[in-house]
Image (cartoon, grey):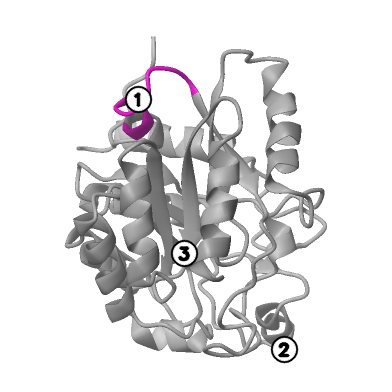
Amino acid sequence: MREAVPYRTFADFLAERFSGKMQKLTVDAGFTCPNRDGTVGTGGCIYCNNSSFTPQNGRGAPVAQQIAAAKSFFARKYPQMRYLAYFQSYTGTHAPVPALLKLYREALAQPQVDGIIIGTRPDCMPDPLLAELKAMRRSTFVMVEYGAESSHNSTLETINRCHSWEQTVDAVERTAAAGIETGLHLINGLPGETPDMMLATVDAVNALPVEVVKFHQMQIVRGTELARRYEHGEANVWDFSVESYLDICVEIVRRMRRDIAIERFVSQSPASMLISPRWGLKNYEFTARLLKKLLLSKF
């Protein structure tokens, strides 16, 4: 019997939309980002090394080939599994609309793929693309996950995000109005942010028509501008211990609107790339500790 979880999970969200077990398959379609290629800026986010969260055997391969390879990994143990193609790497809408639709439709045409999740930025959802996704949503599952990171414009400027919180609000509201499931990606512990600022972002998210949120702790990864600043004592990041981050996550659950599903609280970069924090915990181990702490708290 499943232990009670005092918040809405991503599994709960999926169970309302699909009859069986679902698994996301990460697709790397070869995109870049507008704050890398000069569209709105250069250099990218100061913390970003895409290699820290993107499988390295996919980039450059056709979408169908990537999905087939990923499915083979899960199919051995779960032959009845169904899948969602997840366009995760860089900015998943940063290309001409016809080229994007070709990639999305290629993913949806693969056997056992029942929908797509598109990871992108709030300043990269033009109305023509949104109209196409609205039409696509009539026959399949479509979700857009916006990398918002923070509700504080001062933080967004510090990390070279090159978009504002107001653009996040606009993108989320337009996407929800189109009838498309909408998620937000947020980072706890960004440079210059205090725990109170992190919780203020939760309050700001609660005011939006969002179905899913993803959090993770700020990770300092080799090969990034943030790593360079960290090595020179200039990073100004909150130095979370496991216990202090658990406390923040408990407060996030207390504040988060109850109908919003929380997909995750932590992420884990490869050990060879990670500088800090090095907690020595797998994601599931952290989540188990958080659940125990939540169940001991008063909700």
For this view, does 150 lie left or right of residue 26? left
Q: Where does the magenta region start and end?
A: 13-21
Q: Secondary structure at mark 3?
A: strand
Q: Which mark is residue 232?
A: 2
Q: Amino acid at mark 1?
A: Ala
Q: Residue at x 46, y 57 (%)?
A: 244
Q: Dot 2, how many residues are within 10 Å of its Cα: few (below 14), some (14-19), or many (20+)?
A: few
Q: Amino acid at mark 2?
A: His
**CB under 8 Å between callouts 1 and 3?**
no
Q: Which mark is residue 15?
A: 1
263 or 101: nearer the eye?
101
Location of residue 105 in the rendering, given as x and y in whole percent from the top left corner: 54, 45
* Badge nearest the viewer, 2 or 1: 1
Q: Quadrant of the N terminus?
A: top left
Whether residue 221 is situated above or below residue 60 in the rendered picture: below
Residue 17 covered by magenta stretch: yes
Whether residue 239 is situated above or below residue 159 in the rendered picture: above
Q: Dot 3, how many residues are within 10 Å of its Cα: few (below 14), some (14-19), or many (20+)?
A: many
Residue 171 showing in the rendered view: yes
Q: CA distance from mark 3 to mark 2?
A: 22 Å
Residue position marked by numbered label 3 in the rendering: 187
Q: CA distance from mark 1 to mark 3?
A: 26 Å
Q: Residue at x 68, y 29 (%)?
A: 71
Sooner in the amino-acid sequence: mark 3 or mark 2: 3
Residue 56 covered by magenta stretch: no
Location of residue 3 in the rendering, given as x and y in whole percent from the top left corner: 37, 19
Q: Residue at x 49, y 66 (%)?
A: 97
For this view, does 48 lie left or right of residue 130? right
Q: Secondary structure at mark 2?
A: loop
Q: Main secondary structure of the magenta part?
A: loop
Q: Amino acid at mark 3?
A: Ile
